[in-house]
Amino acid sequence: EADGCDAAFLEACDRRVYLPMRGFTSSLNLSVASALVLQKVFDWFPGWVGDMDDAERNALRDAWRPLIAKSDAAKVSHGPWLDAPETIPLGDAAAGASVSCGSWAPRRFQQLEEAEAQSR
């Protein structure tokens, strides 16, 4: 948010991050920018992803699911998934993948990843 953030908000920041954009994109909304930053952090530090157990995850999904379809059309469209949540593909597609920040990451991140791997 180069022009949209309030000066007080920017002054409260510890750091500003630049996200390069490709193609015709001229801006990213906050949710997209946050997702990109979080994905990069989790790529660099896979151990930071979290430790939510299945019961807590399922309780959050059960609370969230009714909020998905607010209109009648959405309820019709999403009905099969809402009625049978076990069919919603929520599995971890990256399970078992070996993630490495590789040579493109700043050296301090490479060192942190190496130290984390050695501590396992």
Image: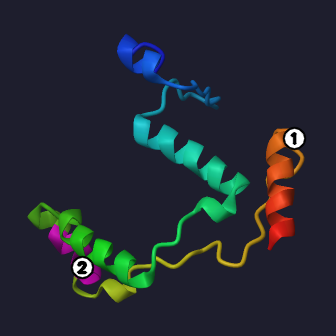
Badge 2: how crowded within 10 Å, few (<14), some, or many (20+)? some
> Is residue 105 something one can see in this rendering?
no
User: Residue flagged by tag 2: what amino acid is it?
Assistant: Leu
- Disc 2 is placed on an element classified as helix
- The x, y position of residue 28, in whole percent, is 48, 32
Residue 71 vertical placement versus 27 (above, below): below
Residue 86 vertical placement versus 66 (above, below): below
Relative depth, front residue between 23 and 4: 4
- The x, y position of residue 120, in whole percent, is 80, 74
Badge 1 is on which residue?
A: 107
Badge 2 is on which residue?
A: 82
Q: From the viewer's perspective, tell me whether residue 104 is left or right of residue 66.
A: right
What residue lies at 42% left-to-right and 13% top-to-bottom? 3
Task: First in sequence, mark 2 or 1: give its number.
Answer: 2
> Is residue 99 something one can see in this rendering?
yes
User: Residue flagged by tag 1: what amino acid is it?
Assistant: Arg
- The x, y position of residue 20, in whole percent, is 65, 29
Residue 54 vertical placement versus 74 (above, below): below
Magenta stretch: helix, strand or loop mostly: helix
Residue at the front extreme of this rendering: 119
**Magenta-colored stretch includes residue 99:** no
Q: Quadrant of the N terminus?
A: top left
What residue lies at 38% left-to-right and 80% top-to-bottom? 88
Range shown magenta:
75-82
Quarter residue 19 falls in:
top right
